[in-house]
Amino acid sequence: MWQLAVRMAGHRVTALIAVACAVLGGAVLVTATGVLAESGLRSQLPPGRLAGADVVVSADQEYHPAGDLPIALPERRRVPARLAGELAALPGVTAAVADVGFPAAVLDADGGVVPAGSSGGPSAGLSPGPEAAGHGWSSVQLAVGARVEGTAPGPGEVAVDGATARAAGARIGDRIRIVAAGRPAAGYRLTAVVDGAGILFADPVARRLSGAGSTADLIALRTGPGASDEVAAAARERLRGSGLVVTTGDDRGDVESPGAGASRSLLILLSGSLAGVVLLITGFVTASALAVAVAGQRRDLALMRAVGATPRQIRRLAATQGTVVAAVALVPGVALGYLVAGRFRDLLVGREVLPDALPLTVSPLPAVAAVVLLAGAVQVSARGAAWRASRMPATEAVAESRAEPRTASKVRTRCGLALIAGATAISAGPLLNRTPLGATATSLAGILGAIGLALAGPALVRVLGDAAARRLRPSASAPTWLAVSNVRGYAMRLSGVVSALAMAVVFVLTYTYAQTTVLTATADDVRAGTLAQQRLTAPDLGGLPVGALEAVRGTRGVRAAAPVGTTTVVWPYRQFGEPEVESATAMILTPDAGGVLDLDVTQGALDKLTGATIAVSADAAGTRGAGLGRRVRLVLGDGAEVTARVVAVYERGLGFGPVVLSHDLAAGHTTTALDQSLLARTDGGDAARRALAATVAAYPGLLLEPTGSADAADLNEAPPEVWINLAVIVVLLGYLLLSIANKLVATTAQRRGEIAVLRLGGTTPRQILAMMRREAAIIGTAAIATGVLLSAIPLALLGIGFLDRPWPAGPGWLLPALAALVAGTAFLTVELPARRALRTPPAEALSIRE
């Protein structure tokens, strides 16, 4: 069977190249998606500052819902500091450090902030930034191979890393100014330079500045040679039932930077969202290419049936032939998949979605998954394509091998129409759920509709071909008559090409416009809900300095000012009687936030945001049963479980998130305990703006920018996930068009015999080219028209749901550009093979089995 399959493949090279390209592209996409998924589950950050700690004790930075994957908690959870003394007594422990981290930044001689994380030492590139740059001197024990110059700092003294000292122009013995934990800049004498250590204070000073009290960020243990495993086991036994985690080896990196480690969950979500689309498109393209290849062998298969081959042998032969081609394409496809995953990681790092220090996990598992999935897809698709030829009586199979079936399968047509109807129903998602999750229904509806078109296409094309033939004028040219006749007689062949091109149109339109519509609606929410004209931030300080709020409120011309922060919450709830858990970004507001923000509150009021209270969006209130006055259980970003009362329900959830925490509720549950930004509403005059700028200038590291300076509807200012999705669209579109182009080339090449018969009947090469061009025009026009029609209802409902108008938001040039691309693909992939076929003499062409 294998030898026969290989020999048959040698006579159908063009058609099988299309199959190979489909499998190769599918292997690239599936492997890359698998690498991202595995990296999200298994990748580890380098230990950074904790490289010298053999064993680390910390709080669990994950929330573990029943029956689901753990959810990362980005806010630092703390441990009792007394554990350092208890664990130091364990056999094999040589040192125990109760480490604390807090915001700190060094000022240069001009009062500017020296950027954190610029050290060239062992921890280069791994510094957590200004949010946790400050530490106690005892943490110097964790620095492996670090060069220490000078002596330990005492009260009023400090040690910094070499790069920071050079940037500040300071030497040992000099006095430098430091902003620590949001306090006003204070002078410290520099007593030591320690490479890669951050900013080190005397331990009592560090504990006072951090506000940690009797807690610590983590307990780091140094052990004797070869004793780390025994110490880790003893520590786990000692801490059994406490909820604390003992880590060694590569797991230490996540303990050092819990916020950065939480970004791994994005890889899991991203790969999960990509997997469905990738598998749908890969399966569709592979099945379509195999259908063309098997259709070109109908005569061979029919003759084999006539000489006694069983239906099972015919299907097995088709599957074996597909497997042979797939085996050739899988190896380079898998290799390219790993390269594409690496480039995708670079994109995520460049858009600051992933930390640069987080590597990809490279293992054979994604390759094995790609091979298994694509081999299975090839087997199923090839057997399905050969099903009809294998089941027909031998005489009928031989007769039908000369032409397509005259009537399409009723079951296939009904399934296709049902799928289109179901896709239309799914597209109502944005009307029911005005969230990014609801917008995904638009893209899914488009893809399902395109698959439905592929199933119902032959019947629809034949109906349209018959209608065109009846309306065709007798004066029409011969090429036009021939083109219309081919549409009627080869509806199966034509519909396969049209549906593939239509899928490309639907995919690009629905996915792109879903992104831009949600982006525009979010920008509209933010723009309409932001009353403040100015925003103050302090990114180089790790948070706003203490006293900035009062100073801004006291500035002439400022009418209202309020701090605004963000954190992460985990929201367990019940939906349709089943438990659900969702992680969401939450704003942190004070009761006076109404002076700078208008969330379009419909129930309750924001001025009641005191104590254990929250406000929720109308969508969240409806889907999670969190109406006004209800009590809601939440898990805050540091894992603390709280019960809060809903005091307000607002409409602008798309722009401001599903939940707002009161400042009191979030206090003590964020890593830095500092406000992240400050919104100020002025009287709008230039005098107020200048006065506010003067106030800001008095605080080193404080930045002032207009709230309208970053328009969220502008792609240059779009969130990173938008760029990621657009990159995915480009990659998948390239895969679709390449596969479609190969399919069209193969389909045209298989018509050599048909072209030869026309030439022998007196048709000139010019007329044949004219006929082929008209067919290409029909293909392109039909693909664009059906793609637009399949996209119209989902996009109209998307626009109504998000923008209160029956059309989406996005670039107007997209449809014309896409139409030109599709038309060009159809024209070139028909024109070039047709010209090649015309170069072969008719008699010779009839003898070529291709």
Image (cartoon, rainbow, N blue to C red):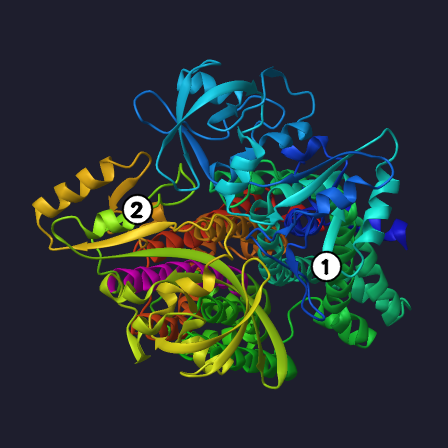
Say what secondary structure mark 1 lies in.
Answer: loop
Amino acid beneath label 1: Gly
Q: Nearer the viewer, residue 479 or 437?
A: 437
Q: Which residues are magenta?
A: 499-528
Extreme-front residue of the structure: 155
x then y, percent, for residue 257: 59, 43
Disc 1 to disc 2, C-alpha distance: 37 Å
Within 10 Å of disc 1 (Cα), the crowding (few <14, some 14-19, many 20+) is few
Whether residue 652 is situated above or below residue 726 in the rendered picture? below
Mark 1 lies on residue: 243
Identify which residue is drawn at 55% across, 44% down. 354
Relative placement, left or right, of 570 versus 661 is right
Residue 509 in the magenta stretch? The answer is yes
Mark 2 residue element: loop
Q: How many marks?
A: 2
User: Which mark is drawn over residue 547?
Assistant: 2
Q: Is residue 307 visible?
A: yes
The crowd level at tag 2 (other Cα within 10 Å; few <14, some 14-19, many 20+) is few
Q: Please tell me which residue lies in front, 94 or 59.
A: 94
Q: Is residue 429 above or below residue 33?
A: below
